[in-house]
Amino acid sequence: MGLRAIGNGNTNSPAASNEDVRKLKFISLSRRLFRIFVVATLPLYAIPGLAYTFPVDPSAPSSLKTPPTGTGFGNAARNQMFLSDSFVGHNIAGGFYTTPSTPWINGQDVIVSDIPFVGGEVYWNSVLNTWVSNGIRYFTGNGVPNHPTGLFPIPSDQPAYPYYAALPDPAGEYPNASYLPIETYDLYMSVPQNPVYSNIPTAIGELTFAIATQTGATFHVNLASTNDANPYVDPIAGLPMDQCWGHPVHMQYHYHGYSWKCFPNQGNQIEHSPLFGIALDGFGVFGPRGDGGVLLTNEDLDVCHGHSGKIDWDGILTDMYHYHLNNEFPYGPGCFRGTQIGTFSSNGDPSVTSAVPGPAPLLGALAALRCSRRLRKRCRLQASPRE
Ligand SMILES: [Zn+2]
């Protein structure tokens, strides 16, 4: 992803040394070669059988465990999500999950081979920048992943279409959820660099609770609403996702369930999984393996779907709390263990946008403003995130 963020043509640095000039020339040449490469390989994408190759997932579960009807989300407990009563502005107090009767559900098992995944192979120029300053870890980007996604809006001849067509668009902008597109957006996230563990878990209060640092997209809470009397379902039980277990809402592509299969660095089968993401409280989100490569079940994890142990944290082996992804609901963090919850925004840095009133065309100016407020190097990277 760094490749796409570098080389935005900003050659006006006042302190450009000869070495800088050489680097810029090199970057410029690299860009030309890269473009030639892209042009040369583009037709390949259209040839059936020569499509994108996803990384091989050595742990490939054939089923996932979805929560039984009656499972609540008002308290912290294993196999649950713990959501605040005013979750994204809706009063969900007293709500509970219903297991839908979709064809890929057998008891509490989600049968992977029976899911009519959303088809298509759509490529994105993913951008994700990250840096640390004064104990805060920052992320900016455009929210789309570095792997192909399914085709959204979903064509009406697709097997996945009726499931989406039966659901309302949560934002009320489209006739139903089948119309929802994926678009880039101005992703901003700030979290504690070195989070502190709390004995008392914190409920999750918003849709986006973690960023997938390996891909540039985000994870959303595993709660979907339907038209039924009790409207709450586990999204992967009620809806087919694309083959990376992602789909859009509010134009934002995000993951549920078994998304780690599409992440480029799977680690190996005899070691603890590598970092897959960072949660909003700053703790790391790792793949499905614990020490020695053992696949972790919910019994191995606490009520927030994590545990403490030695992990690579900013390049240093550190004994600290962290979350794991696995194939049992809630598949990733179910609540927060950190004492501080960070900030996520799909409209850029909220501290900047609130200080500068004005319509969307100001976004470029806002990016420049961010530059003066933060590391200049970061700003150059950010000034032209899309190529
Ligand atoms: Zn672990």
Image (cartoon, rainbow, N blue to C red):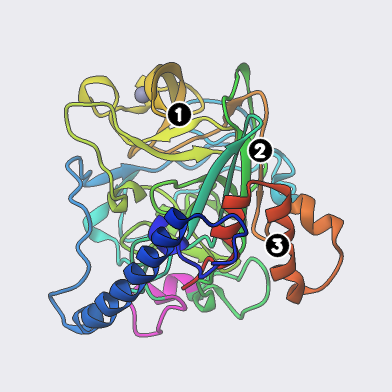
Q: Amino acid at mark 3?
A: Ala
**In the rendered image, which quarter contains the N terminus?**
bottom left
The magenta-colored residue range is 152-164
Residue highlighted by disc 2 = 342
Q: For residue 161: magenta?
A: yes
Q: Is mark 3 within 8 Å of ligand 1?
A: no
Q: Is residue 68 above or below residue 178?
A: above
Q: Is mark 1 within 8 Å of ligand 1?
A: no
Badge 1 crowding class, 10 Å Cα cut-off, few under 14, some 14 to 19, many 20 or more, is many
Give the distance between the C-alpha atoms of the residues marked 2 and 1, in whole angstroms: 19 Å
Q: Amino acid at mark 2?
A: Gly
Tell me the residue at 57%/76% (across/down).
Answer: 176
Mark closest to the chain's N terminus, 2 or 3: 2
Please give the label number shown on residue 116: none
Give the distance between the C-alpha atoms of the residues marked 3 and 1, in whole angstroms: 39 Å
Across and down, in percent, residue 102 comes to 37, 60
The answer to whether residue 145 is seen in the rendering is no
Mark closest to the chain's N terminus, 3 or 1: 1
Please give the label number shown on residue 305: 1
Q: For residue 190: magenta?
A: no
49 to the left or right of 341: left
Q: Amino acid at mark 1?
A: His
| Viewer-nearest residue: 154 or 251 | 251
Please give the label number shown on residue 368: 3
